[in-house]
Image (cartoon, helix red, strand yellow):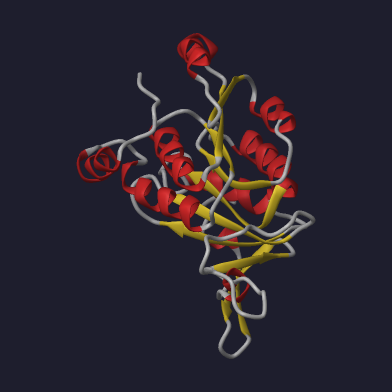
Amino acid sequence: MNFNPLSYKELLDTFHSSTNSTAKHLLIIYSLVVATNSKKIIDMGLGMTTRTLRLAALKTGGVVYSCDCDIKRFNYLLDQQDQSWQLQLCSSEKFIQSITPPFDFVMHDAAHDYYQVKMDLEMILPKMKTFGLICVHDTQQPDLGHEMLAAICDAAQGHLISIVNLPFYAGMAIIRVEAGDQPQITPLEGGTLKDGRSETELLPLPLGIHRGGCFEQVNNSYGRWLRWRLRKLVKGY
């Protein structure tokens, strides 16, 4: 298997013609990394997203740190590492612990069970830059989606995040860390106002904000909060 960075043509061709479960999310993933000028890019679960992230890293000058637990399948890739791509074949918790924070962007498409995803996110969230992004794949997958959403909700306890869930193909949640102990992301040139503030700080919050065990939908124009509970969306949760 080839895990070299996609070309722009390959990215578009894959988006249009591939039946891979991440194919229709690849352009979004590329855009998120480039627009946030992400430098430390975490990639959990090797696949087409890895090649997309590597292409984006070429634009931002970042490094993609990839992880997969399938040592037998991917051992040959260890010889293909370079300054912009680092690979570990180990458990996700060992991997996350080994990477020095802060993280700009995380793509999680590794484990898909509640307990592992929850543990991964609990370890990742404190290491994220303010306004950094975490993408979690398979949040609309019929057999897995309810566990993925429940894991996100429970892992986010004590953290201020906002979330958008893309409701097509297998689904992908985009989580933004609204506040934390790490510095802010540094968007591409042109995203800074004359007074020094980043335009990122002024963006309306995405679909909902996590606070105290529930998600709240936000109307920024009038400051009204429309509360709704995640368990209403997740069967059996």
Comparing 132 with 135, the one in front is 132
Q: Relative to residue 28, is residue 62 drawn left or right?
A: right
Q: Position of residue 177 (x, y in %)?
A: 65, 58
- Please identify the residue farthest to the bottom as the structure is shown: 222
Q: Position of residue 70 (x, y in %)?
A: 52, 16
Comparing 102 with 234, the one in front is 102
- Quadrant containing the N terminus in the rendered view: top left
User: Would you identify the image quadrant in which residue 227 lies?
Assistant: bottom right
**Residue 117 higher or lower than 133, as above or below:** above
Q: Residue at x 54, y 69 (%)?
A: 191
Q: Residue at x 52, y 60 (%)?
A: 188
Q: Residue at x 47, y 10 (%)?
A: 76
Comparing 234 with 160, the one in front is 160
Q: Position of residue 135 (x, y in %)?
A: 52, 48
Q: Residue at x 66, y 43 (%)?
A: 121
Comparing 222 with 184, the one in front is 184
**Residue 178 higher or lower than 152, as above or below:** below
How many labels, in total? Answer: 0
Q: Position of residue 22 (x, y in %)?
A: 37, 41
